[in-house]
Image: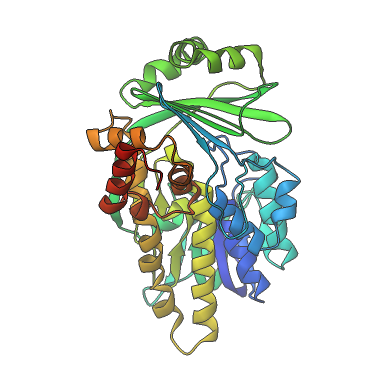
Amino acid sequence: MTKEKKFDAIVVGARCAGSSTAMLLARRGYNVLILDRGQFPSDLKASTHLIWHGGVASLKRWGLLDKLRGIASPLKKVSLDLGGLVLKGRAPPAGDVDEAYAPRRNLLDHMLLQSAQDAGAEFRAGCTVQGVITEDERVCGVRFSDSNGLVFEERASIVIGADAINSVVARSVAAAPIHEHPRVQGMLWSYFSDLPVGDTEFYSRPARMLFAWYTSEGQTLAGICVRHDEYPEIAQNADTAMYAELDSLAPDFGERVRAAKRETQWMAGVTGGICRKASGPGWALVGDAGLTMDPITGWGITNSFRDAELLSDLVHEGFSGPDPLDDVVGRFEEVRNASSLPLYHFSHDMGKLEPPPQPMIDLFSSLPGNQDDINAYFGVFAQTVPVTDFFAPENVQRIISAGNTGVKS
């Protein structure tokens, strides 16, 4: 067991949240170590890849937008087919960013990790973190084994867990759940070549949601969300069940999928939601380690970028300002939750795939002919329109009243 130099920060997990946080800290001159049990570049199967406008705006601020454009195509148009009603539009921009992207994770995560290393962060692959080290009840480092089974310790002023929903860091510090949501839906998807779509397509049906969008290397991702009680049977017979579902729910879309070439097996994923305590003495959690939402809204990567920025700003303030680091980082949970909890609960409710209540039916029925409000609804998903603003009772009533009178608001 060795004790080497002390780092300013150790980041456990090298994917979206971890590499972004490490990069932002390293760019400010901090000595950062990134640990991950995997090898990079590598794909991440449990991902549908969407980076909504708010997340793309983060990458632009970080000077990475041109690199993103080199690995995926822009997604500007959105279509929502509700059966007898189809809404089409474009989400309001995030600043001057008016597009989403859905890059494959072997490309995106490698881009972020390389940017962190370019900024001066040190990366060690094949390292399995066993737990944190504490002194006087404060986290001061981690203990980990390398690919040869050798055990090491490294020390740091702060340990940041970015190691996904089953975070070792979260478990080691006993980060208590603040909110938990059960699994309510499951997803199946695959990648296709020669599958044309209108950038981003959604098909909402009873107990179902179909989706498709362009990803990297000329391929299109297409899949379905189904209620959790029906998911196991469909997942066990994915190939037969998927095409039957497509043919039944959206025949025109199903015909396009059948005519395309499926390039991979069907991917399957199901997860619940959890919001954990975000920080404590010497530690913090970012990305899915601290907050995992139902994936039906595709917000995971966008949230990770936002929280990486929030946390890295606080860590910098704690290192450079007059207040103790733990006190400053202790504010992370409040600022994270202010942005995230409305989205967290919205994702869970949407993931239930329940029949819409009458006010929601009235709302959607009132949107045709009102392009600004159609776009604003898509902006909820792009994270350019706050969910609490769009669904505020007075705004919903305004839209419904305008629809009833035929006056565009």
Q: Where is residue 88 in the image (x, y as percent from the top left)?
A: 51, 34
Percent of width and height locating residue 247: 49, 11
Q: Quadrant of residue 71?
A: top right
Name the foreground residue: 95 vs 407. Answer: 407
249 in relation to 391, above or below: above
* Residue 74 drawn at (x, y percent): 67, 42
Query: Please, is residue 104 above or below residue 121 in the view?
Result: above
* Whether residue 120 is situated above or below residue 295 in the rendered picture: below
Q: Indicate the quadrant where residue 95 lies.
A: bottom right
Instruction: Tell me which colouring the rendered structure shows.
Output: rainbow
The furthest residue to the bottom? 322
Say left or right for 247 vs 154.
Answer: left
Instruction: From the viewer's perspective, tell me whether residue 85 is left or right of residue 1.
Output: left
Left of 378 or right of it: where is 400? Answer: left
Q: Position of residue 87 (x, y in %)?
A: 47, 33
| Front-lying residue, 232 or 104 | 104
Most extreme residue toward the left, as rendered?
Answer: 358
| Quadrant in the picture for residue 216 | top right
Where 194 falls versus 358 (above or below)?
above
Name the residue nearer the viewer: 386 or 27: 386
In this view of the protein, can residue 109 be seen by the observer? yes
Quadrant location of the N terminus in the rendered image: bottom right
Q: Residue at x 51, y 63 (%)?
A: 142
